[in-house]
Image: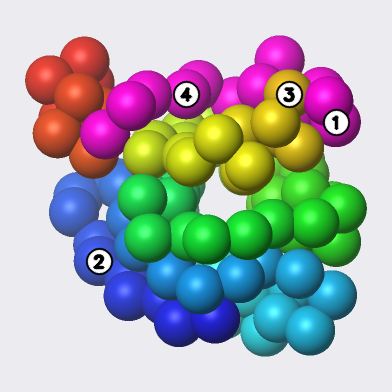
């Protein structure tokens, strides 16, 4: 898994590529938590347009970041999920907790 992080005001934008699974979820958690601990972000935006696969470990690590950001009155937003990632996010209940958009440009329009 590869990640590109951008900070835009109170937003932390994470462009993800590859696979978010049991092999990469700890790395994802460590990188995101490190950034969240550095500053106050109202929004964690996960651009999943290049994410090819996610398993339950990936869902779990996103839920953990959701709890952390929510405890600070922030929100987690996901965008660009493919059909496989959407399916596991839907079945896990993740989509009931986070805002979901088709693309990062749609996120920019709505927020």
Q: Quick one: label 2 or label 4, which is nearer the N terminus?
A: 2
- Residue at image location 38% in from the left, 60% down from the top: 50
> Considering only vertical position in the picture, is 77 above or below 39?
above
* Residue identifier under label 2: 6
Tell me the distance, in whole angstroms, between the alpha carbons under discs 2 and 4: 19 Å
Check residue 92 in the rendering and tell me which mark sits there, or answer none.
Answer: 1
Mark 3 surroundings: few (<14), some (14-19) or many (≥20) residues within 10 A:
few
Provide residue 86's location: percent of width, then percent of height.
61, 33
Tell me the distance, in whole angstroms, between the alpha carbons under discs 1 and 4: 14 Å
Tell me the distance, in whole angstroms, between the alpha carbons under discs 3 and 4: 11 Å
Check residue 90 in the rendering and tell me which mark sits there, or answer none.
Answer: 3
Residue mark closest to the camera, 2 vs 3: 3
Q: Quick one: label 1 or label 2, which is nearer the N terminus?
A: 2
Tell me the distance, in whole angstroms, between the alpha carbons under discs 1 and 3: 5 Å
Tell me the distance, in whole angstroms, between the alpha carbons under discs 1 and 2: 27 Å
The span picked out in magenta is: 91-103
Tell me the distance, in whole angstroms, between the alpha carbons under discs 2 and 3: 27 Å
> Considering only vertical position in the picture, is 110 above or below 6?
above
Check the picture and name the quadrant holding the C terminus: top left
* Residue identifier under label 4: 100
């Amino acid at each position: 898994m590869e990640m590109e992080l951008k900070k835009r005001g109170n937003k932390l934008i994470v462009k993800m590529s590859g696979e978010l699974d049991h092999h990469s979820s700890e790395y994802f958690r460590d990188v995101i938590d490190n950034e969240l601990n550095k500053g106050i972000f109202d929004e964690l935006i996960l651009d999943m347009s290049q994410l090819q696969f996610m398993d339950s470990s990936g869902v779990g690590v996103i839920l953990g970041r959701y709890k952390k950001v929510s405890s600070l009155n922030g929100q987690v937003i996901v965008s660009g999920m493919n059909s496989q990632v959407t399916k596991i996010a839907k079945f896990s209940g993740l989509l009931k907790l986070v805002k979901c958009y088709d693309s990062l440009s749609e996120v920019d329009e709505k927020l």
